[in-house]
Image (spheres, rainbow, N blue to C red):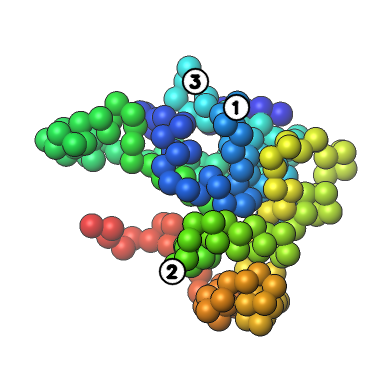
Amino acid sequence: MKFTLPAHKPFNFLSVVNSHGWRQLAPFSYDEEVDTLCYVLRLSNSRVLELKFRDGAPADGVLVESEKLEAGERREVTQKVSWIFGLDLDFSRFYAAARGEPKLAHAKKFAHGRLLRSPTLFEDVIKTILTTNTLWGATKNMTRKLVDELGASHRDASHSTAPPAPLSAVANHRAFPTPEAIAASSPGFLREKIRVGYRAAAIHQLAVRVASGTFDLEALKTSPLPTL
């Protein structure tokens, strides 16, 4: 199925996709030949599916392609995709301020400002930890191993009764691990199998705190704390 999600104008699909290197980190993947971003998402009902995103032109927004979704699943996908692309964000104050700075004069024209995000803050924090004191190639490898070893499979975890749709050639096939999956491992496993080095303890401790409910990381999405 396909559907388009509108964005707060102005919006530029490629500006978000190319905003930084997240598109290269599993379970994201990007097909440059057709300008399609893919992401393997685990829904709250444990169903795992591959989403494909394309420019929603001529309307400002994102064209989403997926397997058939139930009503509740579509609402969840809509919410997650809106967060990934920042579709609801209003940059009018930023653009107004940017008009006074020649180096930012192009910001509104190319709809700069949004950053490609993971659907959860947990995933983004873990990936950020994996960027510390290392080369980008190592970050990609650590993320890939983490997804391969602990992420739920598109084939195995899908609750759909219909046969899974064919996966794209660039898809990663597994979703990003849940806090519970990482918490059930150990710092030693993360250090030796995922090769995250000194980051193992911090990653495992964060997963344990989130999985146990002592740290509601996702609540920060709607936090009243000021960002200025």
**Mark 3 sits on what residue?**
57
Which badge, 2 or 3, comes first in the chain's sequence? Answer: 3
Q: How many marks?
A: 3
Amino acid at pointer 1: Glu
Query: Which of the numbered marks, if any, corresponds to residue 150?
Result: none
**At 63% from the left edge and 77% from the top edge, which residue is drawn?**
191
Query: Which of the numbered marks, if any, corresponds to residue 33?
Result: 1
Placement of the C terminus among the 4 image quadrants:
bottom left
Label 2, label 1: how many angstroms apart (C-alpha)?
A: 32 Å
The foreground one among 119 and 182 is 182
Label 2, label 3: how many angstroms apart (C-alpha)?
A: 39 Å
Where in the figure is residue 193, as x and y percent of width and height?
70, 73
**Mark 2 sits on what residue?**
133
Q: Are marks 2 and 1 in contact (CB under 8 Å)?
A: no
Which badge, 2 or 1, comes first in the chain's sequence? Answer: 1
Report if residue 123 is visible in the image: no
Q: Name the image quarter holding residue 170.
A: top right
